Image (tube, rainbow, N blue to C red):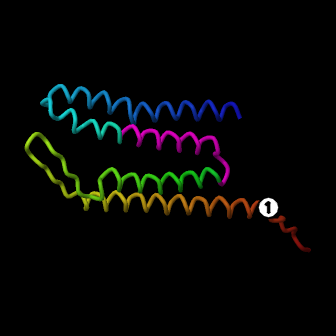
Amino acid sequence: MFPKIVKAMIKGALWFVFLYVLPTLILSSLLSFLPEGAHGILYGYEQLLMVFAVITVFFVVASELTSGTIFQHMFNIGKTLILMVFIVLALEGGIISIDFQNINIVADLTVILILLLAIDLVGLAKSVLQAVNFLSEKAESQLPTPSPKE
């Protein structure tokens, strides 16, 4: 069990670096080029980035710890469902409105939202099929082997 825990911790740390630390460094370097009013706008997205990273790292670690069991597939299905809800909430249903000084910017991102949800639905179908395959292989391995008849 100890090697699984170490592997899960390493994977979790790497995913956290790639999903939060590096984008935050890039975002902070971009903020130096933007005017002062843009800092407040990007702060909300930095929080969303943190939530996304925490969700992903949790499910990566949980999936790694339960690898080789049906729970691994259940965590993958749960991750996909939670990320679908997160995407809808992060994109505010597809219509994003940003106030910048005296300007109100509205962006219709429903097409992008639909594409992201379609990709997640494919991932959900993949996870469900992997769970079904895992259970069928498990049941198949428990069947008695037929003996040859003479």
Q: Nearer the viewer, residue 91 or 134?
A: 91
Q: Which of the 4 image quadrants contains residue 141?
A: bottom right
Q: Which of the 4 image quadrants contains residue 38?
A: top left
Q: Percent position (x, y) of residue 94?
A: 27, 58
> Residue at left 35%, top 38%?
47
Residue, disc 1: 142
Q: Is residue 41 above or below residue 90?
A: above
> Residue at left 79%, top 61%?
142
Mark 1: amino acid: Gln
Quadrant showing the C terminus: bottom right
Task: In the displayed orientation, state which residue is furthest to the right.
Answer: 150
**Residue 62 falls inside the magenta stretch:** yes
Q: Percent position (x, y) of residue 130?
A: 58, 59
Q: Is residue 68 above or below residue 30?
A: below
Q: Main secondary structure of the magenta part?
A: helix
Q: Which stretch is magenta? A: 49-70
Q: Nearer the viewer, residue 4 or 34?
A: 34
Q: Mark 1 Cα within 10 Å, few/some/many (few <14, many 20+)? A: few
Q: Nearer the viewer, residue 77 or 142?
A: 77
**Residue 118 falls inside the magenta stretch:** no
